[in-house]
Image (cartoon, rainbow, N blue to C red):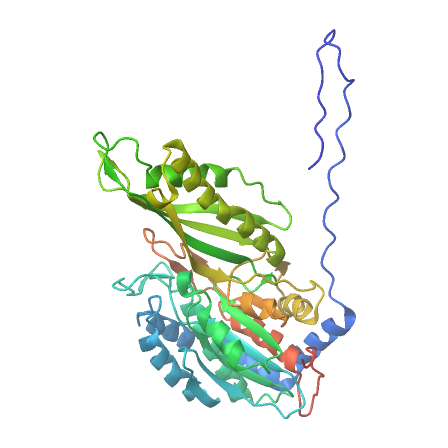
Amino acid sequence: MAAIGVVLAAGCGGTPPQPAAPPDPPAAPYEVSAPVSAAVNAIKEAPAVRAALAAIANDEPRAIADQIAINQIPAPPFKEDQRGADYLRRLTETGLEDVHRDKEGNVYGVRRGTGGGPTMFVSAHLDTVFPEGTDVTVTQQDGKLYGPGIADDARGLTAVLVIARALRDAGVQTKGDIVLGATVGEEGLGNLRGVKAFFAENPGIDGFVTIEPGEPEHVAYEGTGSRRYEIAFAGPGGHSFGDFGRPSAIHAMGRAITKISEIRPPATPRTTFTVGTVAGGTSVNSIAGAAKMQVDMRSNDPGELTKLEAQLLPMATAGAQEENARWNAAAEGGVTVQTTLIGDRPAGTQDRNSPIVQAAFAAPAALGLNPALQPASSTDANVPLNLGIPAVMLGGGGKAGNTHSSTDKEWFDPTDAHLGPQNAMLVALSMVGLAGETPVEPLLPNR
């Protein structure tokens, strides 16, 4: 942070005023290497790829119909089966090989290359953040689509289908394989269970693209990790007057929260925490016998997340100990603490100049867009990044708003939405390389 000059009133003495430090220099513009730029442009100009790009643009009316139909199949957390079955049918119709649903519920198939190249997984997620019983009907007004999940991630699921159809219809030949599909458990307490299971069962994957709502210019290449806990406090409870002097589970939790609120995590790498929910007690005139809180911790750095967790969790126990000491309660008769892990998303990062990041920047530029690197986010890409596998999160095209909102309707504007799947396809093709009459070597190394 730049220093701030302080001016002292005349006659007050003290240190003479110091000039303010110069502002930090602006970040250098991102530059794509000549080989990556040349490869992406060569792929874009290959006749088969040009045909595929045109096919995606022409497919947009069908894509919007797909997006609406997919969204109107409920997929609340942990209940993605109905949408998964429908998506299995849709993927099969694109001509992919070995389309199946795995034990976790992920749905995917493969478009085989000529051999010798790396393998990419291009994916979206089946689940929505909205609970069972949510009305997922899609309405249209003023050119926009409205409905819970219509952008996140019905658009991503549609983009994957559009890419698969375009590669088939244009007869694009790749050197490496491209796996296309969808995962379960990306949202909330799903804890990325789908993508974790996928990489556990498919160790040969060399790179990954996840498609989320957003404009194709936006490139996220780091994954924010999170650890979430439910911390329960249990005590003897009692009447607020007759049993006064007994320790309170709520007071113990309050002491713990006070300690937690004073944690000073580093600003860089960005590391955060919050006590997100609290509950407890039975009535206003009772000493609380039970209380619980849910805590969220996040960081872009796995090491800092571990440090934060090691600092924060003991504060719950310390809060209970202080409450017990306040009322001279014996350990066996006082407030106890139970900690349960309810969320675990690994953090991950990679070199901002790695081939996949450069290609994800070069592809939208080749399409006439203005790409920009984005801050770290929490998506399916966290898992491969944590495993050391190159990965990026790309926007599915169009514009979106009110995602995850339970009060305002989530919306999607399909204007120029075809640019999303066009961009993701170019990135994937640059990774696995082209075969045939206009060969281009893969940018992604085989692991």
Quadrant for the C terminus, please. Answer: bottom right
Residue 274, x across and y down, in percent: 47, 46
Q: Residue at x 41, y 47 (%)?
A: 276
> Going by the picture, which residue comes out furthest to the top?
11
Locate residue 49: give its quadrant: bottom right
- Give the side of residue 244 with respect to residue 341, left or right: left
Give the residue drawn at x 39%, y 56%: 404
Determine if residue 58 is in view: no
Where 264 sits versus 177, above or below?
above
**Residue in view at x 63 percent, y 61 percent:** 371
Q: Image point 33% across, 54% down: which residue?
A: 406
Q: Is residue 46 visible?
A: yes
Nearer to the camera, 46 or 243:
243
Callout count: 0
The picture places residue 433, in percent across and down from the top left corner, at 67, 83
State which quadrant residue 150 falls in: bottom left
Most foreground residue, 45 or 24: 24
Indicate the position of residue 381 as horizontal and vertical percent values.
55, 67
The image shows residue 386, relative to residue 1, as above or below, that is: below
Q: Is residue 390 above or below residue 257?
A: below
In which quadrant of the rendered view does residue 363 lie? bottom right
Where 175 sits versus 364, above or below?
A: below
Q: As rendered, which of 144 and 229 lies closer to the eye?
A: 229
Q: Could you say which is closer to the camera, residue 31 or residue 48?
A: 31
Task: Locate residue 399, reporting x and y percent.
Answer: 47, 60
Q: Quadrant of the N terminus?
A: top right
